[in-house]
Amino acid sequence: MKPIWIVDDDQSIRFVLEKALAREGLPSRSFASARDVLTALDDPADRGPQVIVSDIRMPGGNGLDLLEKVKASLPGLPVIIMTAYSDLDSAVSAFQGGAFEYLPKPFDLNKAVELIRRAVEESRREEVAEQQAVPATEMLGQAPAMQDVFRAIGRLSQSNVTVMITGESGSGKELVARALHKHSPCANGPFIAINTAAIPKDLLESELFGHERGAFTGAQAMRRGRFEQADGGTLFLDEIGDMPADLQTRLLRVLSDGHFYRVGGHGAVKTNVRVIAATHQNLEQRVKEGVFREDLFHRLNVIRLRLPALRERREDIAALTRHFLQQSAAQLGVEPKRISAAALQWVERFDFPGNVRQLENMCHWLTVMAPAQLIEPKDLPPEVGVDTRQVVPLNQPLVPVDNARPAIESGPVELPQADLDDLPSTLASGVTPPLGDGQLTPWELGLDVETRVLLAGEGGDVWDALTRRFESRLIVAALAATRGRRVEAAQKLGIGRNTITRKIHELGLE
């Protein structure tokens, strides 16, 4: 891992941050001025920083100027701006310049380290994204259900067979249809899409098959229908389950022999079209109800592709969210916004009844409405249902409020005497020293206090109660880290697959 660069003319700030980062196993490198940082960035032998933590007001260069120059050459590098002058202009300028976060002095050291850890995670994600950068793809999806769809598209790439795509509204059925067309023998032909549910019944026949001049009032000229327009290519019939019964008969004839008549016409028109149909409805049930022709159903249902709902492929939500944020920013001509891990957790837990289309609209909304470049849980739209009582630190999983215990307040923890002796006399006030060797960490202190509180009560089941909560925390955190993949979560925890499955059931984490 590359080091965190600390830029501050105050030696005490540099010292305290170096010590705190060292205790967390994070390498660091300090600079007294922005000028020194720019010199190091220009050095080709230097590996560069993972994150930059910089003061604003320093001799030899302004921190905001440094931010601007860093972003120009390394746009994906997180920069945290800190200042003792906590005014509105500084905060606005920092975020407008692309700062990862704004840290006013004096600050709590534990919170500062946590913020740096978040920036490190963001930096690593940016590095992975750069390594995996490829031209924009038609569809995104690592979930097994989506991989099945991709495989089916690949297998169908040498065929013009009729395909039926099923799936909920907004799940991306037209994207699949376009992909099937693009990777087919008729890819050089046109792709024509029509939503049969969005066109009034009286107009749908003319829309599909065209009409002759004078066929009805207003038909002042011959018009080609969608079947003629799609000749040599693909016709995508969306929401086919809503097609009127009389048009189902005409569609069946076209699928049978490729011939049809324009409205008001007397001569058959021949067309060579691949038909891809889609519906969110249960066509088998509509056949039983007598509102959809069984012979048409079997004609369309040659190959069926089921597109999963977004809630069935939650592991794809993170990639889709970042993709749509980038896409929205490009459309609006603004800087792409980033989403914090905490906010992403809430997004991934949301069921998205409108599926991918709803996620895309949400990202467009966030691009316009989120106040800062980094999207936090409080910035998410109301339908996500963020409860501020459930917003917990990033290293803890989200748990129901009813199961949550009050947070334990802990005061400053003293440095060991050896470190106190090394402290510069100019140690900035308000900076909480890091934990010393041999002292309890905050979570251990919290556990100690919680245990004493329970023991002071009725007792009896303290061991079981705390063990259940401890195991729940471990499993939920591991599942969050692995996007719900149980086998991988078990491996990371060092337990067996059967054990984690049993524990999830016993602890009610299903």
Image (cartoon, helix red, strand yellow):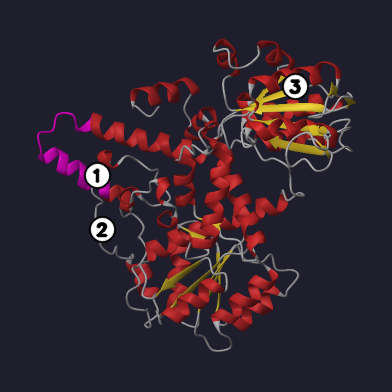
Disc 2 and disc 1 in contact, CB within 8 angstroms: no
Query: On the rendered image, what quadrant is the C terminus found in?
Result: top left
Disc 3 and disc 1 in contact, CB within 8 angstroms: no
SS for dot 3: helix
Give the main secondary structure of the magenta stretch.
helix
Residue identifier under label 1: 405
Residue identifier under label 3: 251
Magenta residues, as a range?
446-463
Residue 466 is covered by the magenta coloring: no
Residue neighbourhood size for the residue with mark 2, other residues' Cα within 10 Å, grouped as few (<14), some (14–19), many (≥20): few
Mark 3 vs mark 1, foreground winner is: 3
Question: Is 292 placed above or below 487 here?
Answer: above
Which badge, 3 or 1, comes first in the chain's sequence? 3
Q: Amino acid at mark 2?
A: Ser
Residue neighbourhood size for the residue with mark 1, other residues' Cα within 10 Å, grouped as few (<14), some (14–19), many (≥20): few
Q: Position of residue 277 (x, y in %)?
A: 70, 27
Occupied quadrant, residue 194:
top right
Question: Is 105 placed above or below 362 here?
Answer: below
